[in-house]
C-alpha cells in the first residue's frame, strides 16, 4: 500500500497520523506541493485534480482525505469507524462538519489566506473581509467543538478515538502556523494535547512542526526593528 502525500499538507497529515498511530504499514511517496510535483503527468494520472493525498492499494487508488480514512478504517482499523448505524453516522457527521464550514472559516479564511500565493495576492480589502468573517465563523465553530462535540468526552465522538479525530486534529493544528490562541476553548486545547500524546503524532507531524517554526522565525525577523545605519566616521 502506497500513500502519495506532502507532509506539510493538512489533508495529508490527517491520513499519515492515522496510519502511524494505528500501526498500518505503508510505503511513503512524497509529493512536494512547493515544487509543483502534484502537476507532474505521472501524478495527474493518479489524481487528475492534482491534489494530495492519494492512496494506492494494489490496483485500487482513492483520493480525498476523509474517504481515504473511511477506507483505511474499514480495511484495517474498524474500531475507528463503528459499523453500528448510529455510531457510524455520528462519526461521519463529524468528518463532514470538519470538512465543510470549519474548514472554510478556519483553514481557508484564516490560515491559507496567509500561506498560499493565490490568496496572498488578493487586494487588501479582500484580506480584511476574509479575516473578519473567518474570525467570527471560527469562533462559532470552535465553541461548538468545545462545548458540544467534545463536552465531557475525551474524543470528538465519545470515549474512543475515531477517524474524525485525525481529520479534525489536522485542521485545528493548522492554526499553529498563526499561533492561534485556543485558551478560550479549554476542551479543544485538552483534546489537542491528548492527540499529541498518541504514538503516531511525532512521525506524522515532524515536518509540519519544522514548517511552523520556520514561519515563526521569519515573522520575528520581519517584526524586528532595522539596525540603525552606522554614523559617518
Image (cartoon, helix red, strand yellow):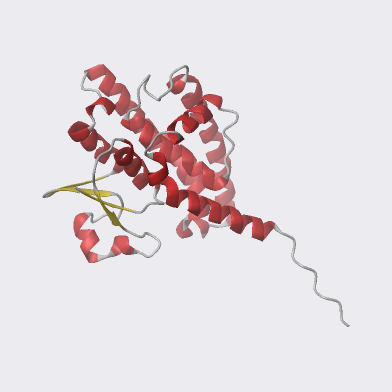
The single residue placed furthest to the right in the displayed view is 233
Quarter of the figure with residue 6: bottom left
170 vs 146: above or below? below
Q: Residue at x 35, y 40 (%)?
A: 17
161 vs 101: above or below? above
Residue 71 spot, x, y in % from top left: 21, 37
135 vs 80: above or below? below
- Front one among 27 and 100: 27
Q: Residue at x 55, y 27 (%)?
A: 185
Residue 215 spot, x, y in % from top left: 55, 55
207 vs 58, left or right, is right
Q: Residue at x 54, y 52 (%)?
A: 213
Residue 111 spot, x, y in % from top left: 50, 47
200 vs 3, left or right, is right
Q: What is the number of callouts on the image?
A: 0
Residue 231 spot, x, y in % from top left: 86, 77
Q: Name the quadrant of the C terminus.
A: bottom right
Quarter of the figure with residue 165: top left
The single residue placed furthest to the left in the displayed view is 59
Q: Residue at x 20, y 34 (%)?
A: 76
Amino acid at each position: 500500500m502506497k500513500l502519495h502525500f506532502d507532509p506539510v499538507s493538512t489533508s495529508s497529515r490527517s491520513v499519515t497520523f492515522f496510519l502511524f498511530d494505528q500501526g498500518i504499514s505503508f510505503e511513503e511517496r512524497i509529493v512536494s506541493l512547493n515544487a509543483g510535483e502534484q502537476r507532474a503527468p505521472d501524478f495527474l494520472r493518479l489524481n487528475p485534480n492534482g491534489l494530495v493525498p492519494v492512496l494506492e492499494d494494489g490496483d485500487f487508488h482513492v483520493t480525498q482525505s476523509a474517504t481515504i480514512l473511511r477506507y483505511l478504517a474499514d480495511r484495517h482499523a474498524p474500531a475507528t469507524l463503528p459499523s453500528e448505524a448510529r455510531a457510524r453516522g455520528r462519526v461521519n457527521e463529524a468528518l463532514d462538519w470538519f470538512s465543510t464550514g470549519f474548514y472554510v472559516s478556519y483553514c481557508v479564511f484564516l490560515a491559507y489566506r496567509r500561506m498560499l500565493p493565490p490568496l496572498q495576492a488578493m487586494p487588501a480589502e479582500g484580506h480584511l473581509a476574509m479575516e473578519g468573517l473567518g474570525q467570527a465563523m471560527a469562533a462559532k465553530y470552535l465553541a461548538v467543538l468545545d462545548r458540544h462535540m467534545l463536552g465531557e468526552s475525551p474524543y470528538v465522538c465519545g470515549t474512543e478515538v475515531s477517524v474524525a479525530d485525525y481529520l479534525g486534529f489536522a485542521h485545528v493544528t493548522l492554526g499553529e502556523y498563526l499561533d492561534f490562541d485556543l485558551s478560550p476553548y479549554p476542551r479543544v486545547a485538552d483534546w489537542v494535547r491528548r492527540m499529541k500524546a498518541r504514538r503516531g503524532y511525532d512521525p506524522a507531524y515532524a515536518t509540519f512542526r519544522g514548517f511552523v517554526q520556520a514561519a515563526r522565525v521569519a515573522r520575528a525577523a520581519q517584526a524586528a526593528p532595522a539596525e540603525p545605519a552606522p554614523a559617518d566616521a
